[in-house]
Image: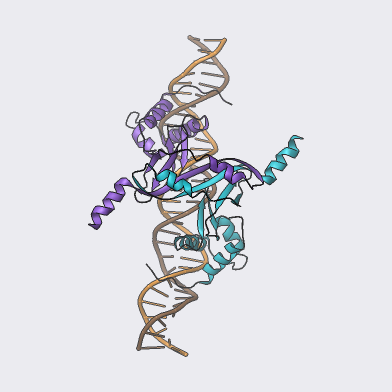
Chain colours: A purple, B cyan, C orange, D brown
Amino acid sequence: MATLKHSRQRDLIKDFLMTRKDHPTADVVYMNVRQQDPNISLGTVYRNLTLLAEIGEIQRLRVGDGVDHFDADTSPHYHFVCSECGCVMDLKMDSIEGITEIAGANFDGYIAGHITYFYGVCGDCARLKASQNA
Amino acid sequence: MATLKHSRQRDLIKDFLMTRKDHPTADVVYMNVRQQDPNISLGTVYRNLTLLAEIGEIQRLRVGDGVDHFDADTSPHYHFVCSECGCVMDLKMDSIEGITEIAGANFDGYIAGHITYFYGVCGDCARLKASQNA
DNA sequence: TCTGAAATCAGTAATTGTTACTGATTTCAT
DNA sequence: ATGAAATCAGTAACAATTACTGATTTCAGA
């Protein structure tokens, strides 16, 4: 594997991601990091997000909306996706790791893990809908 | 909503999907349906797969490999994705519906459901790797 | 059974998210 | 300081999907 050298751009990307709790997409990262470094290119953003995800410093989230989201919090936790506004947020919940064993019980093969995300309506959208119906 | 009219192409697509247990992609559907109707277009396949998924007659699976898979079995069940060969298969397992409640316990908003898929190495790939290492 | 409006079609162009390629620049061990 | 390797910016390529076109099919009502 190639040695990883330091780069200002990669730092900017990671630093930006650490300030955010909303799991931005590559494009959002690009637009924001560009404010600190107007010359950074979209390709660099994609390359470094991929690289950071590969070495485990960030997490790539595929929540099924066709766009990858990124999360600087690599601790095991689950995500919620709002069907109304598309926002992605962390869930504070007890472990559900047990489902991997449940799945593997009658399976011919090896189950390494699972990917789970929850969907529904976030608090803000729920209140908005409630006030509109009033 | 627009009235849904009958179409031979849509029937072909659904009928083909019902014969398959391997959750084919739009492209695979296209290649197969074309054998019965050589003039069908890829756009028609995409449009009808989307349409059928919207009205709930089939299920769209986003397993994170960048390609949508489709399943004529709309009953609740879980899927496994092989990290080696990329195949997608059904899992026979006990219900894990309880995780939705676990997730909703401390959440400000409404959780409608969850999407989970498991990954690892399928039986065939596991045996193949074992024989190669021998 | 006609008729015509709406749905659907085939074909293709456009869009989107992402990855690969280019030659220039930066990093850092020596 | 130096030079090889990593990284960069910019852009082209790519695959999957969606949108648009004018032609064809469907089917409710006359």
Can residue A66 be seen at all in this image of the molecule? no
Q: Is residue A84 above or below residue C18?
A: below
Rendered-image quadrant of the N terminus of chain B: bottom left
Q: Position of residue A38 (x, y in %)?
A: 34, 31
Rendered-image quadrant of the C terminus of chain B: top right
Residue situated in front as seen by the camera: A110 or B108? B108
Can residue A71 be seen at all in this image of the molecule? yes
* Residue with the most extreme left position: A134
* Residue with the most extreme right position: B134
Residue situated in front as seen by the camera: A68 or B128? B128
| Residue displayed at 36% across by 32% down | A33
Q: Position of residue B51 (x, y in %)?
A: 46, 63
| Residue displayed at 51% across by 42% down | A115
Looking at the image, how many numbered discs can be counted on the residues?
0
Q: Is residue A1 above or below residue B69?
A: above
Horizontal arrangement in the rendering, residue A64 relative to residue A131 (left or right)? right
Q: Position of residue B91 (x, y in %)?
A: 59, 51
Q: Position of residue A66 (x, y in %)?
A: 45, 47
